[in-house]
Amino acid sequence: MGDSRSALAQVDRRLQFLIVLMLIVLCLLSLRLGLLQLGDHEQYAARADDNRISLRALPPNRGLILDRRGRVLAENLPAYRLVVVPERAPDLEGTLARLADLVPVSDDERRRFDQQRARSRPFESITLKSNLDEEEVAKLAIHRHRLPGVDIEPYLTRHYPQGELFAHLVGYVGRMDDRDRARLDPDRYRATTHVGKTGIERQYEEELHGRSGFERVETNAQGRILRVLERNDPQPGEDLRLNVDLDVQRAAYEALGDYAGAVVVLQVATGEVLALVSKPGFDPNLFVHGISHADYNRLLDHRQRPLFNRVLSGGYEPGSTVKPFIALAGLEAGVVTPSTEVVSTGQYRLPGHSRTYGDWKAGGHGRVNLELALAESVNVYFYRLAVELGIDRISRELALFGFGRTTGLDLPGENSGILPTRSWKRATFNQPWFPGETVITGIGQGFTVVTPVQLAHATAALAGRGQTAAPALVGQREPVQMVRHDDADWQAVHRGMEAVVHGASGTARAIESELVVRMAGKTGTAQVFGRPDEDEEADEREQDELPEFLRNHALFTGFAPIDEPRLVVSVVAEHGGGGASVAAPIAATVMNAALEAGL
């Protein structure tokens, strides 16, 4: 009996302990619930909203690119793309096979589809093919009932109506890659798939792109959109109006004919770029949706390298186009005057040396002054002048005109060229400067390398008597006085360049009858094969006998009108043979086109 009572008492104590324990737990739970309901309500409500409300980025419309008269160079056109929602296609591989029978799907497109599918949710649409044509859209519409999970979506695509004419200038957009994401603001580019890769499209990417908008949407547990709660529209990109004139650009491109090369047209006072041609070009529309391997290899294997921007990256010996700058250095230093005469016998020999440096004219030019030396491109005159000046004074003069450094043109990828100096040669080759190298520097051969835009910019400074602005495709730059010389020196060089075109013995006199105004200029040759002391006129007699790939590059640079220089034209025609017969007529055609356009 006693044992039974003791056992019951022990059970009662255990029950009381459990009841007390349960009351304590219940109080703790009530306290926690109260904290959640009252104290942490806002925090957990926000977390709940995050689970059901999300932001969806909206891409902005890209700005247009226009020429100076408002004609479209880059636009956004409505297009259609083929998309697939995997979870809505029970037999996805069968659906893809049926699609391939209706529209061509390349290996690259299928590979991109598979990569995107691996990163996407099953209910998200994935692009299989972009830029469908009307026939493809019609076929897909007819067979829509046989293609579960397949849809056709409208969108805006970048288009370049001028094709290869502006390929190197305007550039193109392409799909974003990891390098693009690393350099661009992720907030502005959250919804963007394509960005500028080259040319103006890349240089002015942020202005053209605009700013992404967003939608605040309500989603279910699987992430599906149920409704739009708020919308903030994207801010479209700016339209860019270039300084380039479409008609002048086309005239320059066509004037090059079958030659690979470059043409640059500048306004002297403002530096505005009126034409900037690198030929051959390519169709930039091929790159917008991803160029195929076959098309890309075709461009890479082309013998004239259409992807290479000759205006910015092409390096050429300036040849005789450098002679006006050498002449100015001689006048400034007092080494020569406009009336100083030199007898050209056809050969020049450094004192104490046996090697001879030839003139282009057998027997020489006789007695010539500065004007005739420029007009007839007399090598002997400039050999002697270069030696008397020395490489240090030559380099200083050329540096003032911008040789050896970039011009500041608002395009990516500009080459600085080469301005040879004693220190440059020592650093590059660990060798001293030799007197013979000074001789050929006087006619623009040897180590000197310029780009077409550098040559045009230097010529603009020459035309403006030392004053011009940096080349600009958008807007204008402030003019600066790059070089200072006496008016008499400028006038003497201008007269010599005028005689190149309008003189009785000028090397470019054949184009005089083609011009609508009087023009000053200088022909030149960039050596490809041959002796480094040859000049363009000698080359023109012999170039036709050489294979095309060994012929010299033809150059011409000039300005017009002579009395009040307004426009500069610089031309490089690769393997053209001679500046007088090939490059000068191209320059005349382009100059006439610019003047007729009222520029």
Image: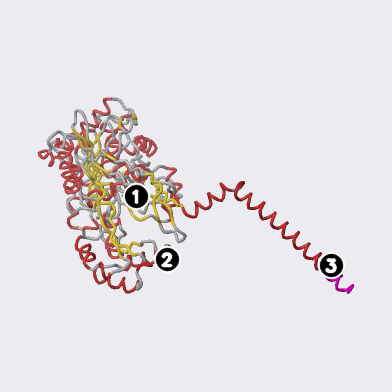
What quarter of the picture does the N terminus occupy? bottom right
Kind of residue at badge 3 = Ala
Task: Indicate whether 152 appears above or below 474.
Answer: below
Instruction: Check disc 3 and report the residue beneath it.
Output: 9
Nearest the camera: 344 or 543? 543
Residue under label 1, please give it.
Answer: 196
Q: Quadrant of the C terminus?
A: top left
Q: Horizontal and vertical percent for residue 167?
A: 26, 50
User: Which residue is rendered at x = 29% and y = 54% of the image?
Assistant: 155
Q: Secondary structure at mark 2?
A: helix
Q: Main secondary structure of the magenta part?
A: helix
- Density class for disc 3 (Cα within 10 Å; few <14, some 14-19, many ≥20) is few
Residue type for callout 2: Ala
- Kindly give the residue lying farthest to the front in the view shown: 1
In the displayed orientation, state which residue is furthest to the right: 2
Residue 322, percent from left and from top: 28, 40
Q: Residue 276 lies in what quarter of the image?
A: top left
Mark 2 and mark 3: span between their CA atoms?
A: 68 Å
In the displayed orientation, state which residue is furthest to the left: 513
Marks 1/2: CA distance?
A: 26 Å
What are the residue bounds of the magenta stretch? Answer: 1-9
Query: Circle 2 is placed at which residue position?
Result: 118
Q: Residue at x 30, y 53 (%)?
A: 308
| Mark nearer the N terminus (2 vs 3) | 3
